[in-house]
Amino acid sequence: MKKKRSKVKVNKIFIVIFFFAFFCAIIKLSYVALSPVVDGTNLADFVSDRNTTKETLYASRGNIYDIYGETLAKNVNSYTLVAFLSESRTTDPDNPRHVVDKEKTAEALAKVLDMDYEYALERLNTSNAYQVEFGLAGRDLSENKKAEIEALDLPGIGFISGSKRYYKQGRAASYIIGYAKTSDEGEIVGEMGIESYYNEELKGTDGETMYQKDAYGYQMGEAFYTIDPISGSDIYLTLDSQIQLILEDALNTLEENNEFAWATFTVMDADTGAIVGSASSPDFNPNTLEGLTNYVNPLVGYTYEPGSTMKIFSWLAAMENGIYDGEEEFVSGSIEVPGATIYDFNNTGWGTINYDTGFAYSSNVGATNLALKLEEKEPGKLKDFYESLGFGTKTGIELPGEESGVLRLTYTSEIATASFGQGITTTPIQTLQALSILTNDGVMLKPYIVDKIVDENGNITYEGSKTELGRKVSSKSITKINELMYDVVYNGLSTIWQPSNVTLIGKTGTAQIAGENGYLTGNNNYIRSFAGIFPYEDPEYIIYISVKQIDGGSNAVASVTKQAVESIANYANITTTKQEDNATEVINLASYISGDITTTTEELERLNLKVIKIGNGTTIINQYPLKNTKVLVGSKVFLLTNNSEYTMPDIKGWSSSEVMNFCNLIGLNYTFSGYGTVTSFNLPVGEIIDLTKTLEVTLSLA
């Protein structure tokens, strides 16, 4: 009996434990069902997160244009090449959707993409991969390259669509425009130049969307919400593409015939301070980053001893402070100052000369005499005058990486050398800003490079304009220094700088280059420069060119500068009267629009001009250059006719500016690689041009 009661007691204990556990489970389930948070986890969020995704909708980046609306930078479609390897993609053996013949596919892709065959085959032999890509060689492909690959009709080859930044004029103004690159997330970010400085304005405001997704990551139904992106603003620069290309051609010519470390050439509007062109060498291709080894923009970031162009301002300082008498004489050659002996560039001088002649001959001794007289009258006055013109301070132009330069004028020897541009450092943009006083009656202008910023609705949110920084010099001093600068080019030692069709005034500079143990020696170890204004009679442009360690010396720099000035003068219709009358050299174009193509061609060819007829129409509907443009004998004149089919001409030997003019007339996209004249291009000569394609041009100095 006892055993029986013991068994019943055990069963009762088991039943109690069972029901207690069951009761706890019910309580737990009720808690889970009723409570949003369990063990620190929000269950609703947990479930939602497993089935919803939030995606950034990147705003369309704004374009960059020149002053006339010519595209400099824009977004274009780009493609990433993909090879599908999984046989599961193919449901119809007669229409395979995966790579079937890996060797054939690798060989074809390697040829089109200039890619190593072994690498391509290795990618196609990747184990257990549904799909593969091909690294840098298979990314950022153009529409043309995509079409070329599609024409191969290779099974299993596809593309992922995206966008990238496209720079229509290639290397032109590369350090001004800069570049932007696409991040791994698909966002385009500015890295240099205007692209970097105005990244937020160009970028716009990203949007976002949230939607439910299935197990494969695809969207299910309508999005929970979508915030549309706001497109970035467009930026119009003050650059004139025609003047820019003239400067690019000038530096390309300089590089073709000479060795040098670097060169920079900039043109500024004399009346407003707008930068209308700025070229540098070396440059780089922002589409591919080919040639990019230096991230400093020479216009604002190069600091160096400017040399004798500073004599413009040291002579002005003497005039403004009442110590200048142009007829006063001094002994040139050399002068002793505490701690140094100052020599003229030829070491012997020109005997006894006056200060007007001293400027024309670029006398260091004359500059030193004036600086010491000024210091004797009021210590620190020369430095104060330099600083009033912006030297030693950033100009604030809308470009990243601007430097201030350094003014050292404490000791007598430093004051002496500073008067002719040694021992101090400046930037090209500072020199251009200071030169603006010469064309604005003594009032200094702030240089600028952005004409306007326009938002996606067409509203102008920023407008660049002429900014006066106050009167720095009297009208009397400006008149005098301009006369002296005229003498430099036409009556002094710098007659090699005279252009043939416009009056150019200016001042040369030849600065020694500082090394670790003093100044470098040798014929090429100088920075040669020229600061000029034209036309002298009614200034429209200020120019500044500087070249480091050129083996061709000043003659080489003068040659390309003259050619550039002549081309700009022709383009801007500011040539002098005596050249206008010389019909054998300069021709003033009329308007040929609405004229008969045959009659007009005969007329222009009689003037020894090369006519490029575009289209097979009989009536001219557009032309380049435009009416009243003055061109040299032998120049090309483009005449667009009333026919929408254009035959591709043989453009070998053309300059980049000529190609640009041709393409702009017919609305054909183009891209340049290299520099110099055209050596090859992708569109077949003699065939009708497909305007949906891009003319890819290779330039060379050879």
Image (spheres, rainbow, N blue to C red):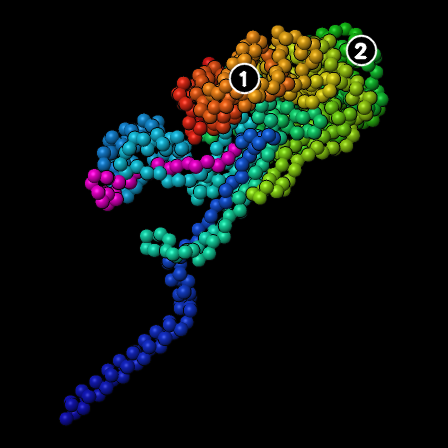
Q: Amino acid at mark 1?
A: Asp
Q: Amino acid at mark 2?
A: Asn
Does the magenta portion include 36? no
Q: Residue 701: where, in percent of width, then height? A: 48, 16
Q: Magenta residues, as a range? A: 73-97
Residue 371 can be seen, yes or no: no
Q: Nearer the viewer, residue 677 or 571?
A: 571
- Residue drawn at x 22%, y 45% is 91
- Residue drawn at x 59%, y 41% is 458
Q: Disc 1 designates what residue?
A: 596
- As drawn, 451 above or below 258: below
Q: Nearer the viewer, residue 518 or 50?
A: 50
- Residue drawn at x 38%, y 62% is 47
Q: Residue 179: where, in percent of width, then height? A: 51, 33
Does the magenta portion include 87? yes
Q: Quadrant of residue 36?
A: bottom left
Q: Secondary structure at mark 2?
A: strand
Check the picture and name the quadrant holding the N terminus: bottom left
Q: Residue 336: where, in percent of width, then height? A: 76, 15
- Left or right of 596, for residue 377: right
Precedes in sequence: disc 2 or disc 1: 2
Q: Disc 2 designates what residue?
A: 354
